[in-house]
Image: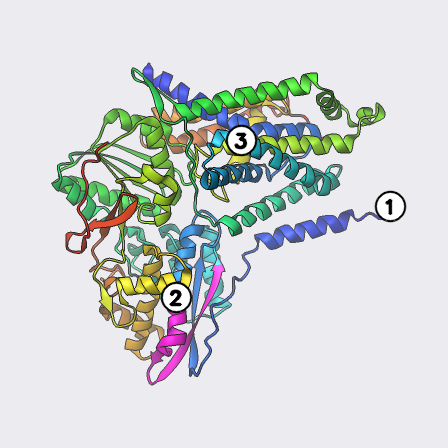
Amino acid sequence: MTELLQATINGVAIGGFYGSVALGFSLVWGVLGVINLAHGELVMVGAYLTWIMHRNHGWDPFAAVVVVVPVMFVVGYVLQRMLINRVIDKPHLTALLVTFALSIIISNVVKLRYAGTPRSVRAAWSGSWRHGDVTIPVTRFWVLVFTVVLMLALWAFLRYSRLGAAIRAASQNREAARIVGIDIGRVFALTFGIGAALAGIAGMLASPLLPVFPTMGPPLTLRSFAIVAIAGLGRIHGALLGGIVLGLVEQYVATYVPEYGTTLGIIASFALLVTILVLRPRGLFGGLRPAH
Amino acid sequence: MNIRSTRPYAIAATAILGGAALAAGPAGATTEPVGDFAGTVRVGAALSETGRYEREGEDVRQGYDLWAEWVNDEYGGIRVGDDRYGVEIVYYDDESDADTVANLTERLITEDEVDFLLGPYGSDLTMGSSAIAEQHDMIMVEGNGASEDVFARGFQNVFGVLTPAGNYTQSALQALAEAGAETMVIAYEDTAFPTSVMEGAQRWAEEYGFEVLAIETYPEGVTDVTAIFTTFRDLDPDVFVGGGHFNDALLFMTTADELGFEPNAFVITVGPSNPEFADELGELAEGVIGPTQWESVMTWEDEYFGTASEYAARYEERWDEVPTYQAAESTATALTLQLAIEAAGSLETDAVRTALQELDVETFYGPISFDETGKNASKPMGFIQIQDGEIVTVGPADVAEAELIYPLGE
């Protein structure tokens, strides 16, 4: 029984992190209709920014948010204005190609500057809380808390602010939004900037959990795909739930299957993705819809 | 705005950019041999300049280049009979991918028409690359693929200068057993090299009387080992033996710290002997033991690069960093090829192969002589421990500079 509890705790913890990664990816796809294959690389850049602050200035990774958010927002805004904007109304394949090329460029630029050596960051809140036979890793707990707070903040922003309303309008019906006077170009740029900032925060959360290196992006982008398929597009709570489902599947299999469990867990989570898409092509909760 | 839009051009330009970024472009040869040489020995090497082995791939390249520059600029060229030949290395980036390295090896042989091949980094890539070499009857000398599989195929043309994987943990486990350790857990990446190391570890565990409490595997590129380490922690073993590559080593130590997993010793295959490991992990790296093919304090010596520490000084001056064993074994690999060519007095494959089979030398890297499968049968494995943030050689006993600390006190 404690084994199940422990596996559940582990799954929720890592799932919270996966959710934070999927958040920006889902937002950008849902609002702009762009599948950003460079999303994992934006996460990676956020992780490197955190490592730089940690390494050179001794900052705790959680504190790095004050640097990561503005920097990544600006990066995202500029990227959207200069590059992504040009491919928004083009066929999906164009956007895929552009963001794919972008992912290669970003990871190689980082590699040139910082070499391929994996980097490590340690949070002040580390170690674990032991309660009998059950362990709760401290850093992961705070990552989960941070993710939940982030989601609440994002939800509140989209629900209650003018800009949030504009973003929701643009994602529902672009033409109608234009007609009522919403500056679509600006909304898209802001949304992509927010998506990049979210990716950066995910990277910041990743840095005490995973080794940080230039090619860490693609598996994270892949998991974001899986989460969006499970939970639906542009649904904030969906990103967290989807992340947790993924995390639980991985951890249950890893815990209960001796020797090969970890590998099998990863297989299982993607097998889940395939099964869901085959049985329910619009995603588990119906959120995936065809392009605009 | 003209209706004849710029769209097709934008797509084409992007596709070309993306495609060009993807293509394994030629990474350029080394310093063209400048000087009075009767000819050039062209050597091919597919290396990992990108991908998960980019760190190690860089070490290998620097090792090969150090040799090539020394041959061309100081040694006066490889002796082939009465002539002196300059050396040129043709490199490609294998992107740490097994299929890519096989394709590139084929390209080196058939298009670039190199004379010999130097091996890539990692057992999985060496497997593929050497298979192509054998197919074309081209000699490959390698120094970074230690898995036993590499040598188990009955190939004639593959020679490995490093201690094979099965023996990686032997000396460390023997020392730990003598220090009183009795129980062990094992976790490894399920690819060729770590699997070989851990199969060897299980053999040595049995030989030295260890009880193996659990064995877990994980896939390459794993991002989470919580389930594994939670299990291990609850088993409370004396020794943790783990294997993969540098990434995993970092992940192990941070996860162990997170979960409060505190065995009396950590033995990790790749990572600890690289200065960046202690650099990145700080106090988390303290006391970790790592097998090492080579350390600069070891007493090996040859007439070309001098002692191990003289080699290290030369490397550091050239590359502005301390050589890892991956770099040293790469230079030793190239040096071995050179010595075989000189012994054979020719560039003919058969003659050089025979020379390799009969080779028996001591180099700055250690003794090199090959058994009938192409393994270096004569080189013992060393191991280091991180003590006070420093990499300290603690075995084998006759070249150790300090004593093994066991158990790790808190």
Give the residue displayed 76% in from the left and 37% down from the top: A89
Left or right of A272? Residue A99 is right
Q: Assess whether mark 2 and mark 3 are in contact (beta carbons under 8 angstroms).
A: no
Which chain is mark 3 on?
A
Span highlighted in magenta in the image: B67-92
Please tell me if label 3 and label 2 are on a single chain: no
Q: What numbered label is drawn on residue B66?
A: 2
Looking at the picture, does residue B19 appear above or below residue A126? below
Residue occupied by mark 3: A202
| Amino acid bearing label 2 | Leu
Residue occupied by mark 1: B3
- Dot 1: element: loop
Left or right of A264? Residue B261 is left
Left or right of B207? Residue B138 is right
> For the residue carrying disc 1, how many other residues have a C-alpha within 10 Å: few (<14), some (14-19), or many (20+)?
few
Q: Residue B224: give x, y in percent of width and height.
A: 41, 32
